[in-house]
Image: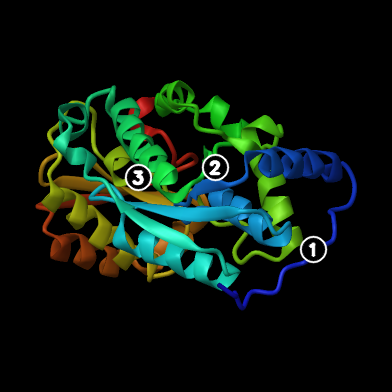
Amino acid sequence: MQGNLLLNIDPPPGQLREKTERLRRILAACQPAVLAVSGGIDSRLLAGCARVWSLDIQGLIMTGPQFASQDTEQAAGQLSRLGLTYHVQPVDTLRLPEVSSNSRQRCYACKKALFQAALDRAEQLGASCVLEGSQRSDEAEHRPGRRALDELGVVSPLLQAGMFKPEVRALAAHFGLPDPQQPSRPCLLTRFKYDSTVTHEELEQVAWLEAAISRLGFGDFRVRVPEPGRCFLQIMEADRPLAEVQAGRLEELIERSGFRHGSVRITERISGFFDQ
């Protein structure tokens, strides 16, 4: 597959060069490999590396109710522009009781199911390794799914290379990948309070509302659901002026999405709200 995205193939300058060379060696040793691509900047960087260094790596887009359809479409479009062969693997983890009940073991059970499916698909494709995009900054976050990845032997090249999020963004910008400052977009299950039953319809409701809010120009934000029928929109302080301008529109979108009650909260931190 020939992509239409022109990338800078020169090594990066300064201190980033050593980690980039370490990353290149790690990826080269994993060939042939399958890369789980979410559409976020971490996995997109690894896809870009596969293109820049002409590595035998294929993309694998995991789909399911916990992933917003627009994220899946974005990931597919990005892989096509890179010219990377990719496959789509549907996995409905909502069938697992730990996931549908949104228990604190949700992330572990979900990752275990997703990456077992990825390993099975990799075997069918003749790949010897499954890659994913965790990096060093993730170690500061609550990540129960990390244990599942370790148990399954999934490789995290950015983590092994010692790259932190700012370095991931810097290398993505150096290569010329689009939107290197892209905000993180974790799975939709993180929008719901722990130990509350989550349905396909509720996940679709949140996905629709977040897509509509994104079209208003908001960047890093989350819809949070503390109880059925009630939500609040968590917005970064930097977007306060936009939230004030769009207050009426936000209220209208929340009502259209089907929530009985909704509000807006301006916060300094977005990720891990229900883990705090």
Distance from the alpha carbon under mark 1 to that under mark 2: 21 Å
Q: Residues within 10 Å of mark 1 (few under 14, many from 20)?
A: some
Distance from the alpha carbon under mark 3 to that under mark 2: 14 Å
* Residue 154 horizontal side relative to residue 160, left or right: left
Query: 130 or 71, which is in the foreground?
Result: 130
| Secondary structure at numbered mark 2 | loop
When the figure is inspected, residue 2 is found, relative to residue 184, above or below; the finding is below
In the rendered image, residue 36, in percent from the top left (x then y), is placed at: 47, 47
Give the mark nearer the N terminus: 3 vs 1.
1
In the rendered image, residue 90, in percent from the top left (x then y), is placed at: 27, 51
Q: Can residue 218 be seen in this view?
A: no
Which residue was labeled with disc 2? 133
- Check residue 36 in the rendering and tell me which mark sits there, or answer none: none
Which three-letter amino acid code belongs to the residue tagged 2?
Answer: Gly
Which three-letter amino acid code belongs to the residue tagged 1?
Answer: Ile
In the rendered image, residue 33, in percent from the top left (x then y), is placed at: 55, 46
Distance from the alpha carbon under mark 3 to that under mark 1: 32 Å
Query: 131 or 98, which is in the foreground?
Result: 131
Which residue was labeled with disc 1? 9
The image quadrant where one finds the C terminus is: top left
Query: 166 or 58, which is in the foreground?
Result: 58
Which residue was labeled with disc 3? 187
Which three-letter amino acid code belongs to the residue tagged 3?
Answer: Cys
The image quadrant where one finds the N terminus is: bottom right
Name the image quarter holding residue 116.
top left
Give the mark nearer the N terminus: 3 vs 2.
2
Residue at 12% x, 34% y: name it: 197
Which mark is in front, 3 or 1?
1
Q: How crowded is mark 3: few (under 14 residues within 10 Å), some or many (20 or more)?
A: some
Query: 207 or 98, which is in the foreground?
Result: 98
